[in-house]
Amino acid sequence: MTVPERPEDVPTDEARIDEALRLLSGVPVELDAAVKRLSRGSGVYAWWAAPSVFPDLSGLPNDSVPSLRMLYLGRATNLRERVLRN
């Protein structure tokens, strides 16, 4: 069996994961601004907050804003709808 070659302009799974992690660890966007930019397609999202919000929960610090930590990482088939519901 032969595996077809991947076109050069199609990112590898590893490249897609790296880009998702980079975007998720960027400066968080306020909800009002995020909703305007969210697609109705699938995607991943993260909720960030100061440690004082839920002091008993541990979470990874945000790479761009170390005073925030990740509260939740999720995926959705309709990203815009999921974020609006939460």
Image (cartoon, grey):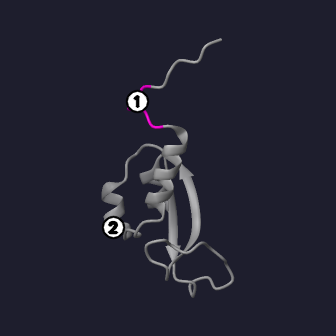
Residue for badge 1: 8
Position above or below: 23 against 52:
above
Residue at screen point 55% across, 52% down = 75
Residue 77 visible? The answer is no
75 or 15, nearer to the observer:
15
Residue at screen point 65% across, 11% down = 1
Q: Range of the magenta residues? A: 7-11
32 or 44, nearer to the observer:
44
Image coordinates for residue 3, horizontal then vertical, percent: 58, 18
Decide: few, some or many residues near mark 1? Use Cα within 10 Å; few <14, some 14-19, many ≥20: few
Residue for badge 2: 32
Residue 28 visible? The answer is yes
Residue at screen point 69% across, 83% down = 56
Helix, strand or loop status at disc 1: loop
Q: Is residue 12 magenta?
A: no
Decide: few, some or many residues near mark 2? Use Cα within 10 Å; few <14, some 14-19, many ≥20: few
Position above or below: 14 against 66:
above
Q: Quarter-wise, where is residue 71 in the image?
A: bottom right
Q: CA distance from mark 2 to mark 1?
A: 36 Å
Helix, strand or loop status at disc 2: helix
Instruction: Mark 2 or mark 1: name the one nearer the start of the chain.
Output: 1
